[in-house]
Image: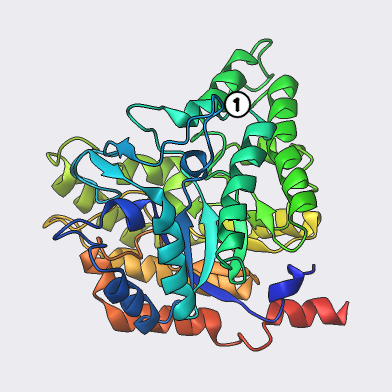
């Protein structure tokens, strides 16, 4: 297995700040001061950051509109600290250039992605219907960054977070192709897989032709067995999101209500009981899960990356909810990812300033990033590649 050439001597401890880096910059919010939060990221030992580049908003609309201001509503309910609490006007450019430059000034590398957030007036994301649209918006975005000299520390570009979930028009087409149904209802049929293969693997292939010195992928968080059957031969790396909450049994226990907190004490009690009493069972399931995805990457001959991961998908600061078990579980999982030669590793999907209970435990982050980066001068992954 060979790493993307430009970075094959490095490994990365990455944090995921999604779109919050842009939408939570108003007074009193978690990203009010980028200099402070980025300094805190460095203090915790991270050398990489994955963010939303808002490519569908940076690129002109299909009808030619060059609107640069957008109105974004909160994606999650008010109990969830991803994104802003209010409907806000945002201007992704030149904010993206300013933010990335601040990262580069601190030697923080960047992974670019997008959640295709909706704008209340333009609904620009609905224009993303297939491979040509993905190529169009990302070509424009990368050209903007190239003009500013801001591509040198971009490790990779994820054309869409957790495809196809965040592309409504693409997801709608997948549903339209659902007949005849697959032999297994939970899986996609051949028409659905062919459409997504053309959209995703095709777009990655075109972007590699346009930008041969950059590295491209699409991240996944569902339908893994379907994607394993597709041709992903254009991918430069495999970025899969891996949580214990994906286990059906544990997922039922750890699920929190997005709209209110009436059940959170009960959930907390059940989770702590399960993670204690069934710890060996969950470890066994998780190590198999980690191995399965590494084996998939090995078959493709590309490195594996994980930027959202390990325990619950949804958790937060709340009197009923403890971060202790989350950190303990993430510690064990990070060690498994390192031992399995994962290339870019997150400590959790809660490594961001708005999750104060997780963020403020500085020594925990430092211990985790030390585990990930301890062999960064010549990672074990590349030593194996050299020996083959």
Q: What residue sits 32% from the left and 49% below the top? A: 314
Q: Residue most toward the right? A: 388
Residue 142 seen: yes
Quadrant of image for the N terminus: bottom right
Q: What residue sits 35% from the left and 58% below the top? A: 21
Circle 1 residue: 129
Query: Where in the figure is residue 79, as x and y percent of width and height?
Result: 18, 44
Rendered position, 357 above or below 191:
below
Residue 218 seen: no
Rendered position, 170 above or below 116:
above
Q: Residue most toward the top? A: 180
Query: Where in the figure is residue 273, as x and y percent of width and height?
Result: 27, 56
Rendered position, 327 above or below 207:
below
**In the image shown, does 11 or 275 lie closer to the viewer?**
11
Query: Where in the figure is residue 185, as x and y percent of width and height?
Result: 60, 20
Q: Give the total number of marks visible in the rendering.
A: 1
Coloration mode? rainbow
Query: Where in the figure is residue 45, as x and y percent of width and height?
Result: 42, 82
Q: Choose top left, top right, bottom left or bottom right for residue 385.
A: bottom right
In the picture, measured across the screen, residue 98 lies left or right of residue 375, that is left
In the picture, measured across the screen, residue 176 lies left or right of residue 215, that is left
In the picture, measured across the screen, residue 152 lies left or right of residue 66, that is right
| Residue count near mark 1 (Cα–Cα under 10 Å), binned few <14, some 14–19, many ≥20 | some
């Amino acid at each position: 297995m060979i790493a993307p050439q430009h970075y094959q001597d490095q490994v990365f401890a990455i944090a995921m700040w999604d779109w919050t880096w842009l939408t939570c910059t108003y007074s009193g919010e978690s990203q009010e001061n980028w200099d402070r939060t980025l300094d805190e990221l460095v203090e915790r030992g991270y050398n990489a950051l994955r963010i939303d580049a808002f490519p569908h908003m940076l690129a002109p609309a299909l009808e030619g509109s060059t609107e640069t201001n957008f109105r974004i509503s909160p994606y999650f309910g008010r109990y969830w600290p991803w994104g802003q609490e209010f409907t806000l006007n945002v201007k992704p450019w030149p904010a993206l250039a300013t933010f990335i430059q601040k990262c580069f000034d601190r030697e923080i590398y960047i992974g670019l992605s997008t959640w295709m957030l909706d704008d209340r007036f333009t609904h620009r994301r609905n224009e993303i219907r297939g491979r040509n649209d993905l190529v169009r918006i990302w070509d424009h975005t990368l050209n903007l960054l190239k003009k500013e000299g801001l591509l040198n520390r971009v490790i990779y570009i994820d054309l869409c977070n957790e495809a196809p979930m965040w592309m409504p028009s693409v997801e709608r087409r997948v549903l339209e192709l659902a007949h005849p149904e697959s032999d297994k209802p939970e899986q996609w049929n051949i028409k659905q897989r062919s459409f997504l293969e053309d959209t995703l693997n095709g777009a990655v292939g075109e972007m590699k032709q346009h930008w041969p010195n950059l590295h491209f992928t699409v991240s996944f968080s569902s339908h893994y067995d379907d994607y394993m059957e597709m041709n992903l031969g254009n991918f430069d790396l495999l970025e899969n999101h891996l949580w214990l909450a994906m286990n059906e049994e544990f997922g039922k226990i750890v699920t929190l209500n997005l709209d209110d907190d009436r059940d959170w004490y009960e959930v907390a009690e059940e989770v702590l009981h399960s993670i204690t009493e069934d710890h060996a069972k969950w470890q066994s399931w998780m190590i198999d899960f980690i191995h399965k995805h590494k084996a998939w990457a090995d078959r493709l001959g590309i490195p594996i990356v994980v930027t959202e991961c390990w325990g619950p998908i949804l958790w937060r600061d709340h009197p009923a909810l403890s971060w202790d078990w989350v950190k303990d579980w993430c510690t064990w999982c990070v060690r498994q990812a390192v031992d399995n030669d994962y290339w870019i590793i997150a400590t959790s999907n809660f490594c961001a300033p708005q999750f104060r209970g997780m963020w403020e435990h500085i020594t925990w982050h430092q211990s985790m990033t030390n585990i990930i980066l301890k062999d960064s001068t010549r990672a074990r992954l590349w030593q194996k590649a050299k020996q083959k």
